[in-house]
Image: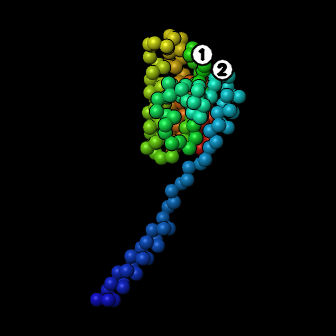
């Protein structure tokens, strides 16, 4: 009986060693979102965007909460949000890196809610702005990274975002 238990134990140990030799999970490429945002704003003409910094309790945190409710309270790896101080400016860029797939899904929901709000006519949304959001705004994700962009060059910016992960 002792020999059978010893053989079973040895077999389990061998199998556990072999399982470590299986395919590895690909690690997600790390991207500096602040650098990417600066590059995008340098290469594409954005009109008067201001960073909504959650650490700035007087202005940035309020702008962030008003535009992206719940986002400033999330525990994110990186967050870069640039908003037009004048509503009808239209352009906008928001980038986030979440710590988990669940948080990435929540960020995407928040970004999509922003897009949905801006593409409907109502208080604070000018018709020209609504039209631009309907035509140009995009929400895209790549693993834990999520981007919302509203710009006339949105397609090119999305391509640049995707190229970061290749």
- 11 or 96: nearer the eye? 96
Q: Is residue 121 visible?
A: yes
Task: Read off the residue under disc 1.
Answer: 86
* Badge 2 or badge 1: first in the primary sequence: 2
**What is the CA distance from the residue labelled 2 to the residue labelled 1?**
8 Å
Quadrant in which the N terminus appears: bottom left
Left or right relative to 5: residue 155: right
Q: Residues within 10 Å of mark 1 (few under 14, many from 20)?
A: few
For this orientation, the residue located farthest to the right is 42
Colour basis: rainbow
**Regarding mark 1 in the picture, which secondary structure is present there?**
loop
Identity of the residue drawn at 66% across and 31% down: 40
Give the percent coordinates (x, y) of residue 70: 46, 33
Give the percent coordinates (x, y) of residue 22: 48, 64
Give the percent coordinates (x, y) of residue 149: 56, 28
- 6 or 60: nearer the eye? 60
Left or right relative to 11: residue 21: right
Quadrant in which the C terminus appears: top right
Identity of the residue drawn at 32% across and 89% down: 2
**Regarding mark 2 in the picture, which secondary structure is present there?**
loop
Identity of the residue drawn at 48% across and 20% down: 118
For this orientation, the residue located farthest to the front is 58
Q: Is residue 81 visible?
A: no
| Residues at marks 2 and 1 touching, judged by CB atoms closer than 8 Å | yes
Number of numbered discs: 2
Can you tell which mark lies on residue 145?
Answer: none
Give the percent coordinates (x, y) of residue 135: 52, 19
For this orientation, the residue located farthest to the top is 127
Identity of the residue drawn at 71% across and 28% down: 42
Task: Read off the residue under disc 2.
Answer: 48
């Amino acid at each position: 009986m002792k020999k059978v238990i010893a053989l079973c134990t040895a077999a389990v140990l061998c199998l556990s060693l072999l399982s470590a030799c299986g395919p590895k999970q690909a690690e997600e490429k790390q991207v500096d979102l602040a650098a990417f945002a600066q590059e995008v704003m340098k290469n594409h003409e954005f009109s008067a965007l201001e960073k909504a910094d959650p650490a700035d309790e007087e202005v940035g945190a309020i702008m962030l909460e008003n535009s992206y409710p719940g986002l400033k309270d999330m525990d994110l790896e990186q967050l870069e949000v640039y908003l037009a101080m004048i509503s009808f400016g239209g352009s906008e860029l928001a980038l986030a890196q979440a710590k988990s797939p669940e948080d990435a899904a929540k960020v995407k929901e928040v970004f999509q809610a922003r897009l949905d709000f801006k593409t409907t006519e109502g208080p604070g949304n000018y018709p020209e702005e609504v039209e631009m959001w309907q035509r140009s705004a995009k929400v895209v994700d790549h693993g834990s990274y999520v981007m919302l962009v509203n710009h006339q060059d949105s397609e090119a910016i999305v391509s640049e975002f995707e190229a970061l992960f290749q």
